[in-house]
Amino acid sequence: MAQYTFLLPDVGEGIHEGQLVEWLAKVGDSIKEDQPLVRFETDKAVVELPSPVSGVITQLKGNPGEIIHVGDPIAFFELQGSAPAPAPAHHDAPATKTAPSAQTSAASAKTTASTSVAAPASSVASAPSVAPAPAKRPQDVLATPHTRAVARQMGVDITRIQGTGRGGRITDEDIQAAANGPSSVSFAHTAPIHQQVSAQIEAPAQAYTARAPVEATTPATSAAPTKNIEITTHGPVERVPQTFLRRKIAEQMAISRQQLVHVTHVEEADVTALFEHIEGSKKSLAKRDIKLTPLPFFIKATIACLKDFPIFNASYDAQKGELLYKKYYNIGIAVDTPEGLVVPVIKDADRKDILTLAREIRDLAKRARERTLKIEEMRGGSYTITNIGPVGGVFATPIINYPELAILGLHKIEDRPAVVDGQICIRKRMYLSTSFDHQLIDGADAARFMRTLAEMLAEPAYLFTRF
């Protein structure tokens, strides 16, 4: 009988390790190719990895809660019929991570990847994404589980695709291009410029910001387990292992503090007119099942300010000593979940209207709390907003979402006395805070940025003229 070793694949660029959550099959089970095998948690999401082959499971390596690295062998299969091609290994995974029986397969995958990267530019430019005939098995293709699922849904033979991703990896865009036919074929050298820039500056894991929900509803956190009680000199204590997501949040917070010089500027905004506009629209929008909140307006106003002050939508390449001004506006929204903070990203937010943003925020927040977001939905952010207001407090100093250079904090909206035209009246007011990297952004620029934002929020009619 032929044997097959399944090495933990790279479920997304920059993911090097994760926590095994649950096995969906057991030793001795007969399993089919693409049948769910294991649930695996990264710092981004909980993903379900399918079996790469059909066969009988002879061994499973790793227990729930254990940290597994990309390239580690996690499952062994006994196959019927002829021997399969060697199991592919992640091209960056060290050989020492693989079992002896999988070392040859890892080397084979590395050779394949390096050959693809080394191909002359002319051959890449002239060769279409769809090859004339399948030359390999589906499990030998470099692609994430999500991309494989997309291919199955769209009826695309993944073995016929020439990947345009790093190391020849097949992307969702490659599948879409192949499904649309030869006229829409993608080429390796034509990736959008924002993807090229993002690939250079993205940290291995998405940074995390101050803990805060998108909307007022905060999910209830389950009670801590009552075990592992220790009796100390001062009394009993309970030992609770740190979750994988919480450990990654801590690591990314530390990186942000180490790399950036954080300074916070606070501004006050009058949002009375904005609230009147929202209240006047609620009834008609409720009939269309649209819940309109201030957050979409805050996003639109922020994007207008980012266009006026592009340094706030930039990152810094320390190795080259260059600022990277992003010409796209992908806005990250901090969402509080029972397991920890998650930051889904609204892509191309500048191209979406208020109602579209409202729908997308609601959907992303719901799936973030359910931990069902896709990894690509938490990548590629250019600027982050954390909405602390629904929880309460006067204001806070959020941590910058590294490698970004600034972050916006939205705080509690309440009725406050204010002086308008020499008269004291009650207005809806709030504090806005921005933490920024003082190495690259001056305090005066931060003050101007926030003053402009406050003025836009005070005059929603002016805000609409910007888009």
Image (spheres, helix red, strand yellow):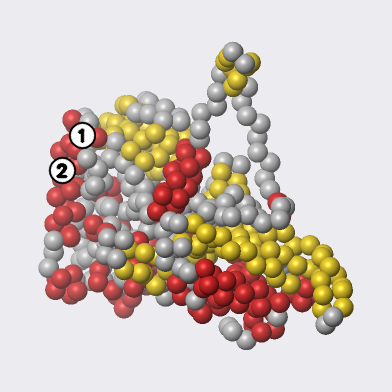
Q: Considering only vertical position in the picture, is 54 above or below 190?
A: above
Residue shown at the point (61%, 25%) measured from the top left: 225
Q: Considering only vertical position in the picture, is 206 above or below 464?
A: above
Could you say which quadrant of the image residue 126 lies in?
A: bottom left
Residue shown at the point (59%, 49%) measured from the top left: 211
Residue closer to the observer: 133 or 123: 123
Q: Position of residue 304 (x, y in %)?
A: 56, 78
Tell me the quarter of the image containing the N terminus.
top left
Q: Where is residue 207 in the image (x, y as percent from the top left)?
A: 46, 53
Residue closer to the observer: 357 or 116: 357
Looking at the image, how many numbered discs can be counted on the residues?
2
Which amino acid, by three-letter code, is at mark 2?
Ala
Q: Tag 2, which secondary structure?
A: helix
Residue closer to the observer: 5 or 179: 5
Could you say which quadrant of the image residue 230 lies in?
A: top right
Q: Considering only vertical position in the picture, is 292 above or below 403?
A: below
Marks 2 and 1 in Cβ contact (< 8 Å)? no
- Horizontal side of 333 relative to 328 (left or right) equals right
Could you say which quadrant of the image residue 359 lies in?
A: bottom right
Tell me the quarter of the image containing the C terminus.
bottom right
On residue 107, which mark appears? 2
Residue closer to the observer: 86 or 294: 294
Residue at mark 1 = 96
Marks 2 and 1 sit apart, C-alpha to C-alpha, by 11 Å
- Horizontal side of 75 relative to 449 (left or right) equals left
Residue shown at the point (59%, 84%) measured from the top left: 466
Which amino acid, by three-letter code, is at mark 1?
Thr
Residue shown at the point (29%, 66%) measured from the top left: 321
- Horizontal side of 209 relative to 123 (left or right) equals right
Q: Which residue lies furthest to the bottom in this view?
A: 465
